[in-house]
Image (spheres, rainbow, N blue to C red):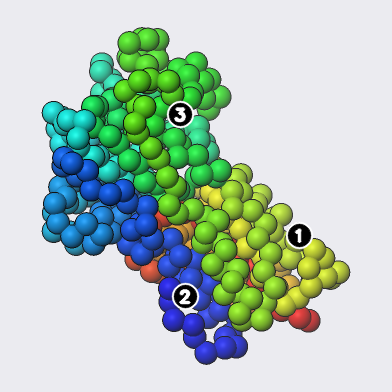
Amino acid sequence: MPAVPPLPLPPRELLQHLFETAVAAVDPLRIIGPHLPPRPRGRIVVIGAGKASARMAQGVEQHYGSGVEGLVVTRYGHGAPTRQIEIIEAGHPVPDEASETAAHRILDTVRGLTEDDLVLCLMSGGGSALLSLPAPGLSVTEKRAIHKQLLRCGAPIADMNCVRRHLSAVKGGRLALACHPARVVTLVVSDVPGDDPAVVASGPTLPDGSTAAAARAILARYAIPVSPAVEAVLADPTLAAPNSDDARLARNSVTVIASAQAALDAAAAAAREAGYTPLILSNSLEGEAREVALVHAGIARQVRQHGQPLAAPCVILSGGETTVTVRGTGRGGRNAEFLLALASALDGAPGVHAIACDTDGIDGTEDNAGALIDPGTLVRSRFDARELLANNDGYSFFAALDDLVITGPTRTNVNDFRAILIDRA
């Protein structure tokens, strides 16, 4: 945990402290140890994928000391130093050749195991793109094109992962089948609303509860063309993922070791120490970033004007994953979009400050985790906030104000963190 700074802190510094506290609470290196099983009679083989997987691998080595092997794949720039477990870096949010190479190598790593061996599968958000191997008959190019279209149209993560599972050779439990007869223990850092471990990274070691028909319906909903190759994969029952009663999965287990709720709880405790009453709205908010911002702005105004649902000084906290339907050509992730919409809606309301950041340290594809706003944000800017919002250009707006939050990769990922601090009038 970050050291508790001298209090009281100015609003900006306090918001940054809350974010740092939230991230520290879900640091895989610190929390993974108690979830690791005893040594097996055979080998310990570590595999995994996601933005937190390298940090999780570090924790595995720290816990066991020696006698582990394997490899995990993470996003470029999110690696971590390990001695026995190889770290591969690959493309995110769009898979690249390294993603496919990683999938092939992980399959090679688990080939030929025995029932005395243990496979530790370290999964976290981002793993769907990082561990990408198309189903037989489908090209990488075609699968990548579908993923890009799902991203651009603002599809929620559950829809994207459903499609990816049904077009994959490793997701939806197929990787677990490759590990059989070894026991598979899956440890998950969850970045999905509801913390369903089968949704995180599209569940490579967990049975799939969705259907090919559901994947078809999602593609139709977003008007994404389906080629003959995609249709053939979705129609072939021999390519279906295993279900929950498959005997080959009977000895396996899964545990979520970190989630948005843990991050929010830590931030709430830090806010209380600073003299602010915390209110956690939800750990799993979804929807268009600008629409979610309007709801948060309404709650903040209600607190300021009527002391409801709680009185100032207070901090409103929320997590989850918003989406952005891209209509413009600007730079900006969903947290920058949320804050730009929030600042516009609040219109300089006194005593209201806010932060919104992605806990992985990367807001969309930019170099910032998120940004900050204060009552003077709109006045200080030389830009028209609504104009930049229409162009999806939150990054440029906050960069000009020097109000970006830049942390670099945090090597964890429990999705978005939002905090709105409301002082007394």
Nearest-to-viewer mark from 1 and 3: 3
* Vertical comparison of 106 with 361: above or below: above
Residue 298: which numbered mark, if any?
1
Quarter in which the N terminus is drawn: bottom left
State the residue in front, 253 or 172: 253
Instruction: Residue type at mark 2: give it.
Output: Asp
Q: Residue furthest front?
A: 41
Q: Secondary structure at mark 2?
A: loop
CB contact under 8 Å: marks 2 and 1: no
CB contact under 8 Å: marks 1 and 3: no
Q: Which percent across, then down, holds residue 85?
A: 17, 51
Nearest-to-viewer mark from 2 and 3: 3
- In whole angstroms, how far apart are the C-alphas of marks 1 and 3? 33 Å
Which residue is label 3 attached to? 162
Mark 2 Cα within 10 Å, few/some/many (few <14, many 20+)?
A: few
* Vertical comparison of 244 with 337: above or below: above
Seen at 38% across and 20% down, the residue is 246
- Which of the 4 image quarters holds residue 303? bottom right
Which residue is label 2 attached to? 402
Tell me which label, 2 or 1, sits earlier in the chain.
1
Q: Which percent across, then down, holds residue 199?
A: 45, 37
